[in-house]
Image (cartoon, coloured by chain):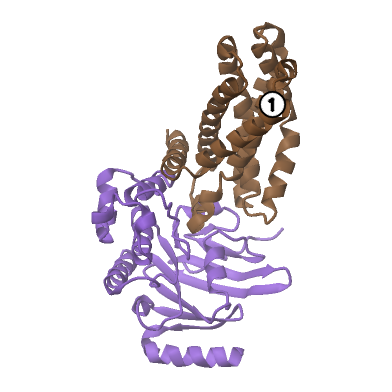
Chain colours: A purple, B brown
């Protein structure tokens, strides 16, 4: 008889990954990743192209099944019970999840209704107003710029109110105003006790919301450090060293 | 209630998207006209051959246009990674399937009605007396076809050879539906009523129930891949 070992991380952890592995055939994309993200904490996942950032986020988001290891979201084993985990998760990847021939408002209504969130017109318009798209609420997404699409995709997350946010390069395609809004929104999300994981290439815009930086090299966790003691420059130097070592 | 709302919103989204883009409907109508032209050219003015072949031709047209339409059913979900969104949506995924099937049934019925009218005009056939029984046969045949078609369209949406795999998977499973539908249509067009083909209608009804239930039960696992 064996006792169940609690792998779900510290008590205030909203997200924990233990020994996460993902392989496509013989190619190992993630190799034994351990990660804990606490309430109110923002983690930036850094890495060169192909380091495994997107795969890590997609595995944690329950979109891709890991080859090995476990993911816990708010104490729920997401690898065994993805349905429960999804209720706590918000994900924004490279795709916007927008239907080109629906208007901004219709897209929000669709995802809100499907997700079981409020689809009242006032709430939908409020979410559009929050991303400064209320003037374009009746315009089809087909006519939107990349930045507007990004903001609309973020409005979807505003409505869903997840506890854990997973963002894959969220600042890409945003103008200065959009990036400023996103930074403020993410800070607000953290201050309300949400956990944030975002992948990024950049140490500039948006990096300020990260409390910790995780550096991936060839699918392995090369470093996991607090940002404040090192500063952005310190993390950048560490990143350069890790990538050079990996190469 | 939430389940019905979720199924409805999927149907609403597909209907609005199709109404605005008309991508599938236009393709199906053009394809239908092409088929009619080929049939007309092949059969010529031979009235006897035409009457004998009409039920089969009618359902062959429905199946071929249905294959084109159903094959596109999940293309819109691949755009902008909307498929990921459907997968990550918490809750019973069978509501998504139900909404998709309903949308496909409506689209297919619309094309079938247009095809029926075009058949009557092209081949100078009086279908007036056959309309009441056809109003039962067409939905029965279409539900079974769309139920399996939607399931297989989802299954092959991310497969490289989906254009080949989709009909190869779908057509053998459709044999009961096609047999029942063609036999019942034959009786309807001959003006014999449906009394003599109740067993075929029962087969159609049973196939519909089995296919829809199978779709509802397996769609979740299929979406998870």
* Residue A6 is at least partly visible in this image: no
Q: Chain of mark 1?
A: B
Q: Position of residue A109 (x, y in %)?
A: 36, 46
For label 1, the residue is B57
Which residue is pictured at 38% across the width and 59% down the height?
A: A153
**For the view shown, which residue lies furthest in the front direction?**
B45
* Residue B168 is at least partly visible in this image: yes
Q: Secondary structure at mark 1?
A: helix
In this view, the residue in front, A144 or B98, is A144
Q: Is residue A137 left or right of residue B2?
A: left
Q: Which quadrant: the N terminus of chain B?
A: top left
Disc 1 crowd rating (10 Å Cα; few below 14, some 14-19, many 20+) is some
In this view, the residue in front, A120 or B39, is B39
Count of labels shown?
1
**Vertically, is B60 above or below A206?**
above
**Vertically, is A178 above or below A73?**
below
Which residue is pictured at 26% across the width and 50% down the height?
A: A125
**Vertically, is A14 above or below B151?**
below
Q: Is residue B10 left or right of residue B170?
A: left
Residue A146 appears in which quarter of the rendering?
Answer: bottom left
Q: Position of residue A211 (x, y in %)?
A: 38, 78
Residue A134 appears in which quarter of the rendering?
Answer: bottom left
Q: Position of residue B49 (x, y in %)?
A: 75, 19
Q: Position of residue A205 (x, y in %)?
A: 35, 79
């Amino acid at each position: 008889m064996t006792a169940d070992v609690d792998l779900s991380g510290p008590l205030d952890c909203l997200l924990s990954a233990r020994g996460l592995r993902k392989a496509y055939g013989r190619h190992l994309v993630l190799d034994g990743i351990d990660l804990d993200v606490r309430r109110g904490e923002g983690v930036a996942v850094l890495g060169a192209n192909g380091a495994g950032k997107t795969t890590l986020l997609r595995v944690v988001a329950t979109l891709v099944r890991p080859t090995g290891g476990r993911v816990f979201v708010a104490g729920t084993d997401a690898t065994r019970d993805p349905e429960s985990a999804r209720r706590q998760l918000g994900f924004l990847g490279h795709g916007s999840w927008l239907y080109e021939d629906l208007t901004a408002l219709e897209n929000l209504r669709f995802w809100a209704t499907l997700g079981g969130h409020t689809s009242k017109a006032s709430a939908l318009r409020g979410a559009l107003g929050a991303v400064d798209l209320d003037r374009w609420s009746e315009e089809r997404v087909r006519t939107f710029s990349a930045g507007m699409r990004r903001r609309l995709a973020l409005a979807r997350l505003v409505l869903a109110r997840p506890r854990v946010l997973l963002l894959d390069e969220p600042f890409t395609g945003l103008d200065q105003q959009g990036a400023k809004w996103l930074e403020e929104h993410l800070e607000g999300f953290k201050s309300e006790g949400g956990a944030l994981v975002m992948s990024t290439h950049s140490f500039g815009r948006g990096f300020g919301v990260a409390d910790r930086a995780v550096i991936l090299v060839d699918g392995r966790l090369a470093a996991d450090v607090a940002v404040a003691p090192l500063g952005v420059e310190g993390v950048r130097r560490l990143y350069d060293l890790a990538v050079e070592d990996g190469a | 209630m939430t389940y019905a709302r979720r199924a409805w919103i999927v149907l609403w989204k597909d209907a609005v998207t199709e109404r605005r883009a008309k991508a599938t409907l236009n393709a199906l109508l053009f394809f239908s006209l092409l088929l009619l032209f080929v049939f007309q050219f092949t059969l010529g003015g031979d009235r006897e051959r035409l009457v004998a072949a009409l039920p089969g031709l009618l359902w062959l047209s429905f199946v071929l246009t249905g294959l084109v339409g159903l094959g596109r059913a999940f293309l819109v979900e691949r755009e902008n990674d909307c498929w990921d969104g459907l997968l990550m949506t918490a809750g019973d995924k069978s509501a998504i399937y139900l909404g998709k099937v309903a949308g496909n049934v409506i689209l297919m019925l619309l094309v079938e009605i247009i095809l029926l009218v075009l058949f009557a005009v092209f081949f100078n056939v009086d279908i007036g007396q056959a309309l009441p029984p056809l109003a039962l046969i067409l939905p029965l045949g279409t539900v079974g076809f769309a139920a399996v078609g939607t399931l297989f369209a989802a299954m092959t949406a991310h497969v490289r050879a989906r254009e080949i795999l989709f009909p190869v998977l779908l057509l053998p499973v459709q044999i009961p539906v096609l047999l029942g539908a063609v036999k019942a249509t034959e009786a309807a067009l001959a003006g014999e009523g449906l009394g003599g083909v109740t067993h075929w209608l029962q087969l159609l009804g049973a196939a519909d129930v089995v296919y829809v239930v199978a779709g509802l039960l397996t769609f979740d696992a299929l979406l998870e891949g």
